Image (cartoon, rainbow, N blue to C red):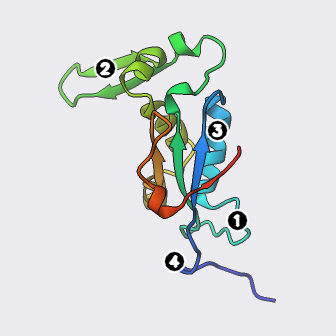
Amino acid sequence: MKTFSAKPGEVPQNWHTINVEGKVLGRIATQIADILRGKTKPTYTPHTDTGDFVVVVNAEKVRLTGKKWTDKMYSHHTRYPGGLKRITAEKQREKDPTIIIHEAVWGMMPKTKLGRAQIKKLKIYAGAEHPHEAQQPQPREV
């Protein structure tokens, strides 16, 4: 029997909706990363994009444990000398809560061309509404 290897374009890509209200960030992020990579499918092939699209709603209501709201820092650089900017998770939630989930999921994705292509299939929205009703996303419990 030959080993199955998925080819690009052969694997159907479905759409899933995940409501993260009240869910712990790290546990949700690992499951989202698995869906994006295609590890939840029996046709998973490491070198091919076999993952699905994921629409995350209620990102502003995600939960962090312990003192992470005040201690966890998000940083970026402005590319100017001395331009390192740092912000706490609590202020990041007020400014743009989608970045919290995006950074957590991106930390669990491979840092290759394939990983960069797969993270583009992640759509995150702060509220309960999203513009992807035409794709008929299936609600997924995680």
Q: Is residue 15 left or right of residue 117?
A: right
Residue 80 appears in which quarter of the rendering? top left
Residue drawn at (45%, 39%) of the image: 125
Q: Earlier in the sequence, mark 3 or mark 2?
A: 3
Residue drawn at (50%, 43%) of the image: 106
Q: Residue furthest left?
A: 80
Q: Work out whether residue 133 or residue 71 is closer to the camera in this orientation and state it.
A: 133
Quick one: SS at disc 1? loop
Instruction: Identify residue type, mark 2.
Output: Lys
Rendering coords of residue 24 (x, y %):
66, 28
Alpha carbon separation for disc pair 1 and 2: 39 Å
Location of mark 1 (residue): 41
Alpha carbon separation for disc pair 4 and 3: 27 Å
Alpha carbon separation for disc pair 1 and 3: 18 Å
Quick one: SS at disc 2? strand
Instruction: Identify residue type, mark 3.
Output: Ile
